[in-house]
Image (spheres, coloured by chain):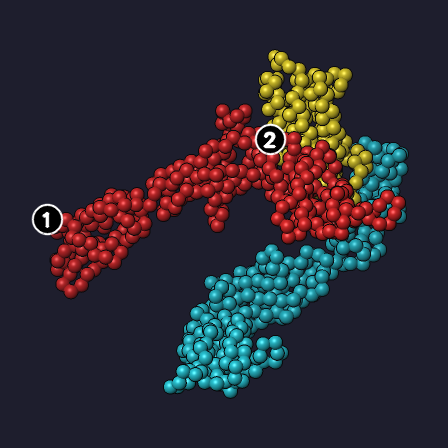
Chain colours: A yellow, B red, C cyan
Amino acid sequence: PLSSHNSLPQSFLLQSQEQVRKIQMDMEELQQRLCADYSLCHPEELILVGQYLGIPRPPLKNCYSQDLRLAACLNQLHDGLQLYQELLKALQGISPELAPTLDTLQLDVADFTATIWLQMEDLQVTPKIMPILGTLPSFSSSFWRRAGGILIFDRLQAFLETAYRALRHLSQV
Amino acid sequence: GISLSASVIPLGASITASCTINPNCTLTEKAIRIVWRLDLEQLPEGWQHQREDGTLESNITLPHLNLTHAVLSCCLLLPGTLQVIEQAELQAGYPPQPPNNFSCIMNLTAQVLTCQWKSGPSTHLTTIFTVKSYKSKGNCQSLEEPIPDCIPRAGEENQCSIPRSQFHMYQKIEIWVKAENMLGEAESPHLCINPMEVVKLEPPILQAAKAMLDPGSSLPQPGCLQLQWKKARQNKHLEQTCDLRYQHPGELNWVLMSPFLSFSPQNEGEHSLCGLHFGTRYVLQMRCIRWPMSGHWSDWSPSLELTT
Amino acid sequence: GISLSASVIPLGASITASCTINPNCTLTEKAIRIVWRLDLEQLPEGWQHQREDGTLESNITLPHLNLTHAVLSCCLLLPGTLQVIEQAELQAGYPPQPPNNFSCIMNLTAQVLTCQWKSGPSTHLTTIFTVKSYKSKGNCQSLEEPIPDCIPRAGEENQCSIPRSQFHMYQKIEIWVKAENMLGEAESPHLCINPMEVVKLEPPILQAAKAMLDPGSSLPQPGCLQLQWKKARQNKHLEQTCDLRYQHPGELNWVLMSPFLSFSPQNEGEHSLCGLHFGTRYVLQMRCIRWPMSGHWSDWSPSLELTT
């Protein structure tokens, strides 16, 4: 059952903003390094490889304003973040220089996922059963890991921007 | 061999020892008697007797052991010689007091939660400190998952750092330090903290500033300083408020501007500081704190010396 | 995928690459052609053709690769977009030159044989140095037992220490350092040494000396200094000869007394140094060497400043 109040507390929004900013900072650093070291600077140059690798794109349609429902949006946000945690794990071995920042990114995404889950618990809207994540791509060459990294970071940036806009809206309701 | 009532006892307590020397120890026939020694000091005779099978036995009680470390020797007195047959190490001290001043700080650069404490008076015994913690929720009423114990590194007795991968930065943990030795254990008060609420920021950077140019004239505005400040790179994602302080070199008191920066989402910028004496040298420092969410003040930035 | 004639080549050499894109890669029908990129720079068109099975293939030769590290990208030019299909990392550099100035010193305190060398000019490639050695006899005509390879620790590129447990201190070993990278390997000249013949002593200790008392009078003998010297504890078992040098503070040249101590089996003693200016401050230093058997001079002892 949806709890009485339909909106998100300001403290949760403030904290989410901080966590989203940190994740974005981590990814900017990774993107800059991949561009400088491997000349992979534009995700649009990797659409073909992305299709070939079959990198899943977690849905966020419950968080778009016309269909914005608090519990459904938080749930989809949580599932999407869990999928991104798995995708980031698949990038392990991307390169020794990037590994520390990638580890930090994974921990930051895990922390934000935990923050969302905690908020869902507070609102008593946690799902009964957890979704099974689809098949994940396996990046079998260092080029595919780098290319996969560029695509994943690009999509996670967009995912987070949409998510934060929804959270801000849901905290002003 | 020697058997003891206990090898580690509270300082000043009593200890009983018994020594048995079996007959097939060739020396026993010529033995006069068993003699006890504490370190190098011979002790008054213990209760002795010889069993039918020739085993020599002696018991002794030391009423108050006031040495934190001593060696008890069981010797055989023979004509013209004293032979040490067996030794036992004795230790005395105190059970640990609860560690106090227990506090933790989240270090974003090293990505560790570093906890510190003051240990009580010396126990004279090897005392192990262990930081124990649990992931938790709400106000730590329920303990969720245990976090691996944190054992201080050699040389850093009263400090321990937990890597961030072992907890969630935005979730409560219940944490305390336990002191333990052979005579007992004691715990500090338990803290219920959200690591990010105890984050200590890296100090900001105050850069050399150009004396502020008068709009339209080449002379710097009198009594003004143009500051360039930059928040530490590792904290750029945190909303912060910052203080500035300045003083004449050599003077004791600082003039504090608090807040100096607030609500400014920028990570770097310029600021003109006016109302100062003309042609005077000033020392400036800046510090920041996570705000409006809670945290600890950074250290003051390295000093910047400027002349108006 | 991309196949290369070699992924590591001598700097300035040529390299040939071939890229094949199989037909089931959905967009190949709309593909205009294959485009090569070296880092971000598009390369002149390579030789291209399409096989019957639809596989696109392009070969390219880079006549002179003058970058020590570059990324070669095989891309598909499609209407309105360039798609990166595959990348290969190229490295160029030089095979290693034989390391020179290879020498070893036996350190009795740390009980290790420490070897040092100078590597040749930079190869731009990851180059591994390994100190190889064999227990040997006579003048190392025959190699007996191999000693485990010594790999320098991180941060100590041109130095490696072999623990004494891996060789006999008074038996010959043949030892050299090998440099190796993807383009080749090279060895330093081989040394045939007896570790004890390259022992470097710890410096002796010159202690504050009392001005020498005139026999029978309370005034110190003019122009004399009474020195107390002590050989380093770790080298006491070695017969040594020692030098002494002294100078006026601030002056450049030293007065050398060599030998200062010879044939003296003692490990410490006093010595009166006379013939000096009266009421003058002197700086003194002492060093020792294993003698008559061979070894290396110890460093000079810390300076001792005295006034006659």
Using a 10 Å C-alpha cutoff, classify the residue at mark 1 as few (fewer than 14 neighbours), some (14 to 19) or many (20 or more).
few
Residue for badge 1: B52
Cβ–Cβ below 8 Å for labels 1 and 2? no
Residue B170, which numbered label? 2
Q: Chain of mark 1?
A: B
Going from N to C along the chain, the mark reached first, 1 or 2, is 1
Please name the residue shown 53% across and 63% down the image: C162
| Residue C170 image offset from top left, x and y in percent | 47, 72
Which corner quadrant of the image does residue B12 belong to?
top left
Judge whether C35 appears above or below C295 on screen: above
| Residue C273 image offset from top left, x and y in percent | 48, 83
Using a 10 Å C-alpha cutoff, classify the residue at mark 2 as few (fewer than 14 neighbours), some (14 to 19) or many (20 or more).
many
Residue occupying the far front of the picture: B277
Please name the residue shown 76% across and 52% down the image: B279
Q: Which secondary structure, mark 1?
A: loop
User: Is residue C179 shown left or right of residue B23?
Assistant: right
Spatial CA span between label 1 and label 2: 74 Å
The answer to whether residue A34 is seen in the rendering is no
Q: Nearer the viewer, residue C70 or C297?
A: C297
| Residue C141 image offset from top left, x and y in percent | 55, 74
The answer to whether residue B216 is seen in the rendering is yes
Q: Nearer the viewer, residue B216 or C224?
A: B216
Please name the residue shown 20% across and 60% down the image: B83
Name the amino acid, label 2. Tyr
Please name the residue shown 59% across and 24% down the image: A118
Q: Nearer the viewer, residue C110 or A49?
A: C110
Residue A51, which numbered label? none
| Residue B14 image offset from top left, x and y in percent | 24, 44
Which corner quadrant of the image does residue C221 belong to?
bottom left
Q: Chain of mark 2?
A: B
Which corner quadrant of the image does residue B113 belong to?
top right
Name the amino acid, label 1. Glu
